[in-house]
Amino acid sequence: MHVFPRYAPADPAHAARLVRENPFALVVNAADGVPVATHAPVLVEDPGGPGFEGATLVGHLARVNPQWRAWESAPQTLVVFSGPHGYVSPTSYEADPAVPTWNYAAVHLTGRIEVHPDPLEVVERTVEAMESSRTPSWRPGAASREVFARIVSGVVAFRVRVTGERSMFKLSQDLDDERRARVRRDAAPALAALMDQVDARPADAGRTAGPEVAS
Protein backbone atom coordinates (compact mmCIF):
# COMPACT_ATOMS: atom_id res chain seq x y z
CA MET A 1 0.00 0.00 0.00
CA HIS A 2 1.34 3.41 -0.95
CA VAL A 3 1.02 5.82 1.96
CA PHE A 4 0.89 9.56 1.37
CA PRO A 5 2.79 11.20 4.25
CA ARG A 6 -0.09 13.58 4.96
CA TYR A 7 -2.37 10.59 5.66
CA ALA A 8 -0.02 8.61 7.89
CA PRO A 9 -1.37 8.48 11.47
CA ALA A 10 0.40 10.92 13.76
CA ASP A 11 -0.06 8.59 16.74
CA PRO A 12 0.71 4.82 16.59
CA ALA A 13 -2.24 4.31 18.90
CA HIS A 14 -4.60 5.08 16.01
CA ALA A 15 -3.34 2.09 14.01
CA ALA A 16 -3.37 -0.14 17.09
CA ARG A 17 -6.97 0.80 17.82
CA LEU A 18 -8.09 0.19 14.25
CA VAL A 19 -6.55 -3.30 14.30
CA ARG A 20 -8.13 -4.08 17.66
CA GLU A 21 -11.59 -2.84 16.66
CA ASN A 22 -11.60 -4.38 13.17
CA PRO A 23 -10.23 -7.90 13.67
CA PHE A 24 -11.78 -9.47 10.56
CA ALA A 25 -8.72 -9.19 8.35
CA LEU A 26 -7.53 -10.28 4.92
CA VAL A 27 -4.58 -12.70 5.09
CA VAL A 28 -2.58 -12.73 1.85
CA ASN A 29 0.17 -15.13 0.75
CA ALA A 30 1.74 -16.20 -2.51
CA ALA A 31 1.26 -19.86 -3.46
CA ASP A 32 3.38 -20.89 -6.45
CA GLY A 33 3.73 -17.24 -7.38
CA VAL A 34 0.00 -16.58 -7.33
CA PRO A 35 -1.49 -14.36 -4.57
CA VAL A 36 -4.14 -16.05 -2.45
CA ALA A 37 -6.21 -14.44 0.28
CA THR A 38 -8.57 -15.47 3.06
CA HIS A 39 -10.81 -13.35 5.28
CA ALA A 40 -10.18 -14.45 8.86
CA PRO A 41 -10.42 -13.16 12.43
CA VAL A 42 -6.97 -12.00 13.53
CA LEU A 43 -6.01 -10.79 17.00
CA VAL A 44 -2.95 -9.01 18.35
CA GLU A 45 -1.24 -11.54 20.59
CA ASP A 46 1.60 -9.23 21.63
CA PRO A 47 1.42 -5.55 20.64
CA GLY A 48 5.20 -5.18 20.62
CA GLY A 49 6.63 -1.68 20.56
CA PRO A 50 5.47 1.51 18.83
CA GLY A 51 4.30 0.94 15.31
CA PHE A 52 3.80 -2.82 15.85
CA GLU A 53 7.57 -3.40 15.96
CA GLY A 54 8.00 -6.91 17.34
CA ALA A 55 4.26 -7.55 17.50
CA THR A 56 2.70 -10.95 16.91
CA LEU A 57 -0.76 -11.77 15.56
CA VAL A 58 -2.82 -14.94 15.90
CA GLY A 59 -5.76 -16.18 13.88
CA HIS A 60 -7.38 -19.25 12.39
CA LEU A 61 -8.93 -20.56 9.21
CA ALA A 62 -10.52 -23.77 7.96
CA ARG A 63 -8.14 -26.70 7.46
CA VAL A 64 -9.76 -27.50 4.11
CA ASN A 65 -8.53 -24.11 2.89
CA PRO A 66 -5.31 -24.96 0.96
CA GLN A 67 -3.72 -21.57 1.62
CA TRP A 68 -2.02 -22.70 4.82
CA ARG A 69 -0.10 -25.46 3.06
CA ALA A 70 2.12 -22.87 1.36
CA TRP A 71 3.19 -21.19 4.59
CA GLU A 72 6.24 -23.35 5.25
CA SER A 73 7.80 -22.73 1.84
CA ALA A 74 6.54 -19.14 1.45
CA PRO A 75 5.99 -17.61 4.90
CA GLN A 76 5.94 -13.95 3.85
CA THR A 77 2.45 -12.69 4.65
CA LEU A 78 0.39 -9.53 4.34
CA VAL A 79 -2.47 -8.98 6.81
CA VAL A 80 -4.87 -6.19 5.88
CA PHE A 81 -7.14 -4.53 8.44
CA SER A 82 -9.80 -2.15 7.11
CA GLY A 83 -11.62 0.49 9.09
CA PRO A 84 -14.62 2.70 8.31
CA HIS A 85 -14.75 4.17 4.80
CA GLY A 86 -17.07 6.15 2.60
CA TYR A 87 -17.53 8.13 -0.58
CA VAL A 88 -17.20 11.90 -0.22
CA SER A 89 -19.52 13.84 -2.53
CA PRO A 90 -18.62 17.35 -3.69
CA THR A 91 -21.99 18.41 -2.29
CA SER A 92 -20.28 18.38 1.12
CA TYR A 93 -17.75 20.99 -0.02
CA GLU A 94 -20.35 23.51 -1.18
CA ALA A 95 -17.81 24.74 -3.74
CA ASP A 96 -17.25 24.64 -7.49
CA PRO A 97 -15.08 23.35 -9.07
CA ALA A 98 -14.80 20.25 -6.90
CA VAL A 99 -13.98 16.57 -7.23
CA PRO A 100 -15.23 13.57 -5.25
CA THR A 101 -12.96 11.31 -3.25
CA TRP A 102 -13.06 8.42 -0.79
CA ASN A 103 -12.21 8.57 2.90
CA TYR A 104 -10.92 5.42 4.57
CA ALA A 105 -8.53 3.92 7.09
CA ALA A 106 -6.42 0.80 6.67
CA VAL A 107 -3.47 -0.90 8.32
CA HIS A 108 -1.24 -3.32 6.40
CA LEU A 109 1.01 -5.55 8.50
CA THR A 110 3.66 -7.74 6.90
CA GLY A 111 5.54 -10.58 8.52
CA ARG A 112 6.31 -14.27 8.63
CA ILE A 113 3.51 -16.73 9.24
CA GLU A 114 3.72 -20.10 10.95
CA VAL A 115 1.26 -22.73 12.10
CA HIS A 116 0.21 -22.23 15.72
CA PRO A 117 0.49 -25.46 17.73
CA ASP A 118 -2.76 -24.98 19.69
CA PRO A 119 -5.77 -24.11 17.51
CA LEU A 120 -8.19 -24.60 20.40
CA GLU A 121 -6.41 -21.91 22.41
CA VAL A 122 -6.60 -19.49 19.47
CA VAL A 123 -10.29 -20.19 18.86
CA GLU A 124 -11.14 -19.73 22.54
CA ARG A 125 -9.06 -16.54 22.72
CA THR A 126 -10.90 -15.21 19.67
CA VAL A 127 -14.29 -15.94 21.23
CA GLU A 128 -13.23 -14.24 24.47
CA ALA A 129 -12.03 -11.15 22.60
CA MET A 130 -15.21 -10.85 20.55
CA GLU A 131 -17.49 -11.38 23.54
CA SER A 132 -15.63 -8.89 25.75
CA SER A 133 -17.38 -5.92 24.11
CA ARG A 134 -20.86 -7.46 24.19
CA THR A 135 -23.53 -7.05 26.86
CA PRO A 136 -24.52 -9.63 27.80
CA SER A 137 -21.41 -11.58 26.85
CA TRP A 138 -21.27 -15.33 26.30
CA ARG A 139 -18.84 -17.76 27.86
CA PRO A 140 -18.69 -21.37 26.66
CA GLY A 141 -19.81 -23.89 29.23
CA ALA A 142 -18.58 -27.44 29.55
CA ALA A 143 -20.85 -28.75 26.79
CA SER A 144 -19.77 -26.02 24.38
CA ARG A 145 -16.12 -26.67 25.15
CA GLU A 146 -16.66 -30.32 24.28
CA VAL A 147 -18.05 -29.23 20.90
CA PHE A 148 -15.04 -26.98 20.38
CA ALA A 149 -12.70 -29.89 21.15
CA ARG A 150 -14.51 -32.11 18.64
CA ILE A 151 -14.49 -29.69 15.72
CA VAL A 152 -11.14 -27.98 16.23
CA SER A 153 -9.45 -30.65 14.08
CA GLY A 154 -11.01 -28.82 11.15
CA VAL A 155 -9.17 -25.61 12.04
CA VAL A 156 -5.63 -24.41 11.38
CA ALA A 157 -4.37 -21.68 13.69
CA PHE A 158 -1.51 -19.39 12.80
CA ARG A 159 0.86 -16.83 14.23
CA VAL A 160 2.32 -13.90 12.29
CA ARG A 161 5.51 -12.28 13.52
CA VAL A 162 5.19 -8.72 12.29
CA THR A 163 8.15 -7.15 10.50
CA GLY A 164 6.56 -4.13 8.86
CA GLU A 165 3.58 -1.76 8.96
CA ARG A 166 1.93 0.70 6.60
CA SER A 167 -1.04 2.69 7.84
CA MET A 168 -3.28 5.09 5.95
CA PHE A 169 -5.92 7.32 7.55
CA LYS A 170 -7.34 9.44 4.70
CA LEU A 171 -9.92 11.57 6.46
CA SER A 172 -10.15 14.89 4.62
CA GLN A 173 -7.08 16.31 6.33
CA ASP A 174 -6.51 18.54 3.29
CA LEU A 175 -9.66 20.53 3.86
CA ASP A 176 -10.11 23.66 5.89
CA ASP A 177 -11.91 23.19 9.20
CA GLU A 178 -15.29 24.35 7.93
CA ARG A 179 -15.42 22.00 4.94
CA ARG A 180 -13.97 19.10 6.88
CA ALA A 181 -16.78 19.58 9.40
CA ARG A 182 -19.33 19.34 6.59
CA VAL A 183 -17.71 16.13 5.29
CA ARG A 184 -17.88 14.73 8.80
CA ARG A 185 -21.54 15.78 9.08
CA ASP A 186 -22.42 13.89 5.90
CA ALA A 187 -20.36 10.78 6.69
CA ALA A 188 -21.68 7.51 8.08
CA PRO A 189 -21.58 7.41 11.90
CA ALA A 190 -18.57 5.07 12.14
CA LEU A 191 -16.53 7.18 9.73
CA ALA A 192 -17.55 10.41 11.44
CA ALA A 193 -16.47 8.95 14.78
CA LEU A 194 -13.10 7.99 13.33
CA MET A 195 -12.64 11.53 12.01
CA ASP A 196 -13.19 12.76 15.55
CA GLN A 197 -10.66 10.28 16.97
CA VAL A 198 -7.97 10.96 14.38
CA ASP A 199 -8.04 14.74 14.28
CA ALA A 200 -4.28 15.34 14.26
CA ARG A 201 -3.49 17.00 10.93
CA PRO A 202 -0.34 18.32 9.27
CA ALA A 203 0.79 21.79 10.31
CA ASP A 204 -0.34 23.27 6.99
CA ALA A 205 -3.76 21.60 7.05
CA GLY A 206 -6.86 23.71 7.42
CA ARG A 207 -5.45 26.45 5.17
CA THR A 208 -6.49 25.24 1.76
CA ALA A 209 -9.69 26.57 0.26
CA GLY A 210 -10.20 23.76 -2.23
CA PRO A 211 -11.27 20.15 -1.80
CA GLU A 212 -8.79 17.30 -1.73
CA VAL A 213 -8.40 15.26 -4.89
CA ALA A 214 -9.14 11.57 -5.05
CA SER A 215 -6.29 9.30 -3.99
Image (cartoon, rainbow, N blue to C red):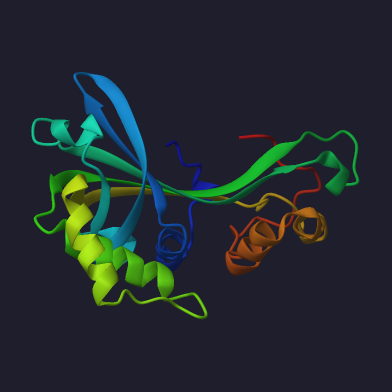
Percent from the top left, x then y, of residue 151?
22, 53
Percent from the top left, x then y, of residue 71?
15, 36
Is residue 198 left or right of 180 when viewed as pictured?
Answer: left
Is residue 25 left or right of 197 when viewed as pictured?
Answer: left
Q: In the rendered view of the protein, which quadrant contains the C terminus?
A: top right
Q: In the rendered view of the protein, which quadrant contains the N terminus?
A: top left
Percent from the top left, x then y, of residue 199?
62, 65
Percent from the top left, x then y, of residue 60?
26, 50
Residue 76 figure quarter: top left
For the point 33% across and 55% down, the residue is 42
For the point 73% across and 51% down, the residue is 175
Residue 49 figure quarter: bottom left
Picture layout, residue 133 above or below residue 6: below
Q: Nearer the viewer, residue 56 or 91?
A: 56
Picture layout, residue 7 above or below residue 78: below
Q: How many marks?
A: 0
Q: Is residue 46 visible?
A: no
Residue that extends furthest to the bottom in the rendered view of this protein: 136
Is residue 38 left or right of 8 when viewed as pictured?
Answer: left
Q: Nearer the viewer, residue 89 or 79?
A: 79
For the point 26% across and 61% down, the residue is 123
For the point 41% across and 76% down, the residue is 138
